Image (cartoon, helix red, strand yellow):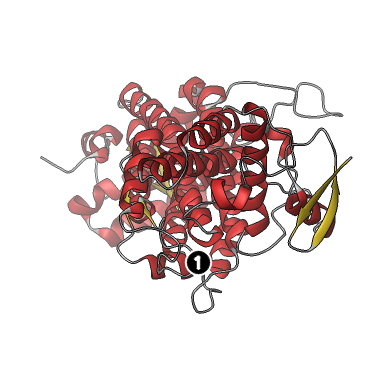
């Protein structure tokens, strides 16, 4: 152990750790759960520290050699070299002060080491005076949430969403001539093609992506430079704009300065908006996954219109059973995303005056939702959707047995007579054609001419 000091006195810190006194205090004071800050959030915060060192140096506020050491240390944190030195759980100060200091201390101690100093000495690099220069927890943490969320959406969620959409597009084209029975209210309805059904799934995914993309407009605004309450105290004029430029350069995304730092620090409406958009995607995925597993129900005693890949045995007692596990996985992910959205909505509404003190859970829940949805779409696409095949025999059987084909007769004999045909066929267990002919409403030739399922999948010419 080594002795370190903070404003409250001496603290013993494990000698092999790069964090310092404030992190150690937080580690001891907040032993709650096991939910730690996501790696991409830690990396985003280190990115902010790197940008600050560069800007402070350029503005002649920070000695170049100290800035270079801080930048090198931050790069190493971003590369994941010190992941084990961030032990804090999210259940801590609502501003994330302990988290911010954890990052400050790790970078400072590594910078000290780079410069040949003694870890824990705070010399020649101080975690507050140098690594946290011109900053506050209150503007850096929301800035890092926005950076991490924007990168995760653009680099992970969107590519997986587009891959799943492409799969549905391919299926829609491949299945365009397979006519099947439609279902409304879980009851038989008029026909459509399997391609039309999968085309609907594609559009749901696409529309959800558009909603998320629109919600990112607010996420791209950063409150950096607002420091403690939004006024910019202890930051020089122009620091905020230079920070946004530097962050955009490092992150490879075009961020902009928040239109109002007071709003972005004291409230987190942008995070609530993005979470709501993620929930829209989750709702689409739930609908699609449930449709697919119902259509694959069976294999002999259910709808059985789709064949899904057999990824693993489905029962510890029933030999040969295979379950729609990828669909079930998606459904569970959606439940968690719904829960995260509720937590984000509540936390985002709980800001008081110049600070929202729920930042850690906002960061955790938002990034978890993004990552879960991204991973779920990739898994569902790669291990289920691409291998979906139609059970043509079952589809044809259901279509032939559908009583709702009678709808094609409405314009020829009227709704009431068509309804009588259905009731007779249903009660007497006869085909629609036999029932129609026996009632004398039309001939067999007329039935064959007018009741053509393939013609019922599009408007009449």
Image position, residue 261 (x, y; %): 38, 65
Confirm whether residue 172 shows in the render. Answer: yes
Q: Is residue 398 left or right of residue 346?
A: left
Q: How many marks?
A: 1
Q: Is residue 271 left or right of residue 101?
A: left
Outermost left residue: 461
Decide which of 300, 257 is in the foreground and name it.
257
Decide which of 133, 290 is in the foreground and name it.
133
Q: Is residue 429 above or below residue 236?
A: above
Image position, residue 214 (x, y; %): 31, 51
Confirm whether residue 433 shows in the render. Answer: no
Question: For residue 420, what is the image quadrant?
Answer: bottom left
Q: Residue drawn at (68%, 56%), measured in percent from left and top?
A: 98
Image position, residue 302 (x, y; %): 61, 37
Q: Residue drawn at (39%, 39%), measured in percent from left and top?
A: 201
Q: Is residue 293 above or below residue 283?
A: above
Residue neighbourhood size for the residue with mark 1, other residues' Cα within 10 Å, grouped as few (<14), some (14–19), many (≥20): some
Q: Residue drawn at (66%, 41%), measured in percent from left and top?
A: 123
Decide which of 8, 366 is in the foreground and name it.
8
Q: Secondary structure at mark 1?
A: loop
**Location of the N terminus (image quadrant):** top right
Outermost right residue: 1
Question: For residue 115, what is the image quadrant?
Answer: top right
- What residue is shown with label 1? 228
**Location of the C terminus (image quadrant):** top left
Image position, residue 195 (x, y; %): 34, 31
């Amino acid at each position: 152990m080594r002795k370190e000091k903070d404003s409250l006195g001496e603290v013993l810190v494990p000698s092999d750790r790069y964090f310092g006194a404030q992190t150690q205090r937080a580690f001891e004071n907040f032993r709650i759960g096991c939910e730690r800050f996501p790696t991409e959030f830690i990396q985003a915060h280190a990115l902010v520290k790197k940008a600050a060192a560069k800007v402070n140096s350029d503005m002649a506020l920070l000695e170049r050699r100290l800035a270079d050491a801080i930048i090198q240390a931050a790069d190493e944190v971003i590369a994941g070299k010190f992941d084990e030195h961030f032990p804090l759980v999210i259940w801590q100060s609502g501003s994330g002060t302990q988290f911010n200091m954890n990052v400050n201390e790790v970078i400072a101690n590594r910078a000290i080491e780079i410069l040949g100093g003694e870890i824990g000495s705070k010399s020649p690099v101080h975690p507050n005076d140098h690594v946290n220069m011109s900053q506050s927890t209150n503007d850096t943490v929301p800035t890092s949430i926005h950076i991490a969320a924007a990168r995760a959406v653009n680099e992970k969620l969107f590519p997986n969403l587009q891959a799943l959409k492409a799969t549905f597009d391919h299926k829609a084209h491949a299945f365009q001539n397979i006519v099947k029975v439609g279902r409304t209210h879980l009851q038989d309805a008029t026909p459509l093609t399997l391609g039309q059904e999968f085309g609907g799934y594609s559009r749901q995914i696409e529309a959800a992506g558009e909603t998320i993309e629109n919600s990112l407009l607010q996420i791209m605004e950063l409150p950096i430079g607002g420091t403690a309450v939004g006024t910019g105290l202890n930051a020089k004029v122009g620091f905020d704009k230079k920070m946004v430029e530097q962050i955009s350069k490092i992150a490879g995304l075009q961020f902009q300065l928040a239109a109002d730092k007071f709003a972005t620090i004291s409230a987190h409406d942008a995070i609530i908006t993005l979470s709501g958009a993620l929930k829209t995607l989750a709702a689409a995925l739930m609908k699609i996954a449930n449709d697919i597993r119902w259509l694959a129900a069976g294999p002999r005693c259910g709808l059985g219109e789709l064949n899904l890949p057999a990824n693993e045995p489905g029962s510890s007692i029933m030999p040969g059973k295979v379950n729609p596990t990828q669909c079930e996985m998606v459904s569970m992910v959606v439940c968690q995303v719904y829960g995260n959205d509720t937590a984000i909505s509540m936390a985002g509404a709980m800001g008081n005056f110049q600070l929202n003190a729920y930042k850690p859970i906002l960061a955790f829940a938002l990034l978890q939702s993004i990552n879960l949805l991204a991973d779920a779409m990739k898994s569902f696409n790669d291990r289920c959707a691409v291998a979906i095949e139609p059970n043509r025999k079952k589809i044809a059987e259901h279509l032939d047995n559908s009583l709702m084909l009678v709808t094609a007769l409405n314009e020829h004999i009227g709704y009431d007579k068509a309804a009588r045909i259905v009731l007779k066929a249903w009660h007497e267990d006869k085909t629609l054609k036999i029932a129609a002919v026996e009632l004398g409403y039309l001939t067999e030739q007329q039935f064959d001419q007018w009741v053509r399922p393939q013609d019922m999948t599009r408007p009449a010419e």
